[in-house]
Image (cartoon, rainbow, N blue to C red):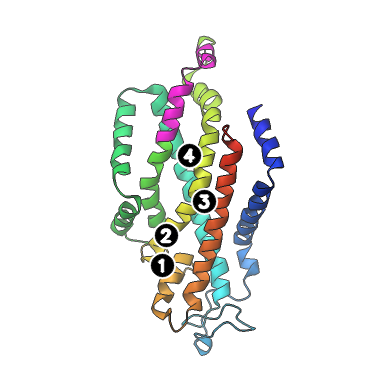
């Protein structure tokens, strides 16, 4: 019944439809990026280095003569896919940890929640920079560093919701009917905490994209010649005054992507939040 209500409210929300279409378009561009790039994003042509935007290279070329538009399209694919995979991982892992801790309690709950307190005590980006640096850089290690610091939020949310839900009468009825712990978690608790977790994840997409691009901008993420938006900005920052298109193009792409997903996240919250 609740899912049906969410569906009806979503269909009536024109802004949600608009932002969902925009986000879906961005994801489709990322999926089909190899087919949409006008040039090979890795191909170097020094004779065409640092060309400003023109009729052939719509966003100009970089210092190696590579087409900036092609690299922005492919870089969006790398950034979006890495961010979505990271978000899915930390939301699932964190939710499972929080649900198990809230349902079982005991020493496991105490240990894992104190561990989450330690991670939450550090500024997230500072810890991610330190972790990524210790792991040696690279896109995978940057994502791993963000995952280490990202799961406690979902664990805390899920634990809090689980502590409330397990006191409900239908949970007692399920226990009396002989439902085991695994079925209880997956059939009765997780479906009922999915809404707030989805809202949190939707609102986190833009933040994760920014953080992953930020690590790449600092040289701790994607390594050359991989086209990644943050790494592209890092490579072009020394030429901001002489070839501004190299850094402004990926910066504009990050702005559009983050703004689109943030607007979508806000509308998803408005639909799912029962107070609206």
**Mark 2 or 4 closer to N-term?**
4
**Mark 4 or 3 closer to N-term?**
3
Q: State left or right for residue 177 relative to residue 133.
A: right
- Mark 2 secondary-structure assignment: helix
**Mark 3 or 1 closer to N-term?**
3
- Asked whether the beta carbons under mark 4 and mark 1 sit within 8 Å of each other, the answer is no
Determine whether 257 is above or below 190 in the image. Answer: below
User: In the image, what residue occupies the spot 54% across and 57% down?
Assistant: 259
Q: Distance between the residues labelled 4 and 1?
A: 28 Å
- Mark 4 secondary-structure assignment: helix
What mark, if any, has residue 84 been given in the picture? Answer: 3
Badge 2 crowding class, 10 Å Cα cut-off, few under 14, some 14 to 19, many 20 or more, is: many
**Mark 2 or 3 closer to N-term?**
3
Q: How far apart are marks 2 and 3 (CA)?
A: 13 Å
- Asked whether the beta carbons under mark 1 and mark 2 sit within 8 Å of each other, the answer is yes
**Residue 134 visible, this angle:** yes
User: In the image, what residue occupies the spot 48% across and 66% down?
Assistant: 229
Q: Distance between the residues labelled 3 and 1?
A: 19 Å
Name the front one of labels 2 and 3. Answer: 3
**Mark 4 or 1 closer to N-term?**
4
Q: State left or right for residue 112 relative to residue 162.
A: left
What mark, if any, has residue 92 been given in the picture? Answer: 4
Name the front one of labels 3 and 1. Answer: 3
User: In the image, what residue occupies the spot 30% across and 28% down?
Assistant: 110
**Mark 1 or 2 closer to N-term?**
2
Badge 1 crowding class, 10 Å Cα cut-off, few under 14, some 14 to 19, many 20 or more, is: some
Q: Where is residue 207 in the image (x, y as percent from the top left)?
A: 46, 52
* Residue corresponding to mark 1: 223
Determine whether 196 is above or below 73 in the image. Answer: above
What mark, if any, has residue 139 been given in the picture? Answer: 2
């Amino acid at each position: 019944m609740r899912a049906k209500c969410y569906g009806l409210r979503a269909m009536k929300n024109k802004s949600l439809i608009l932002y969902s279409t925009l986000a879906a378009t961005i994801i489709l561009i990322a999926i089909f990026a190899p087919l949409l790039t006008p040039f090979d994003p890795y191909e170097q042509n020094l004779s065409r280095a640092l060309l400003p935007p023109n009729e052939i290279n719509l966003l100009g070329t970089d210092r190696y003569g590579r087409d900036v538009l092609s690299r922005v399209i492919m870089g969006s694919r790398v950034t979006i896919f890495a961010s979505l995979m990271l978000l899915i991982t930390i939301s699932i892992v964190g939710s499972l940890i929080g649900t198990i801790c809230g349902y079982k309690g005991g020493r496991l709950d105490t240990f894992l929640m104190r561990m989450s307190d330690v991670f939450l005590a550090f500024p997230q980006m500072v810890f991610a920079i330190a972790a990524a640096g210790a792991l040696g850089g690279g896109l995978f290690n940057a994502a791993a560093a963000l995952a280490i610091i990202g799961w406690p939020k979902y664990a805390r949310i899920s634990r809090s919701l689980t502590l409330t839900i397990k006191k409900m009468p239908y949970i007692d009825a399920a226990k009396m009917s002989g439902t085991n712990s695994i079925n209880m978690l997956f059939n009765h608790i997780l479906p009922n905490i999915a809404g707030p977790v989805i809202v949190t994840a939707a609102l986190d997409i833009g933040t994760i994209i920014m953080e992953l691009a930020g690590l790449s901008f600092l040289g701790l993420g994607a390594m050359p010649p991989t086209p990644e938006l943050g790494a592209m900005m890092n490579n072009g920052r020394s030429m901001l005054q002489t070839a501004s298109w190299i850094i402004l193009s990926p910066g504009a792409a990050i702005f559009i992507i983050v703004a689109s997903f943030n607007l979508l996240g806000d509308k998803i919250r408005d639909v799912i939040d029962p107070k609206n």
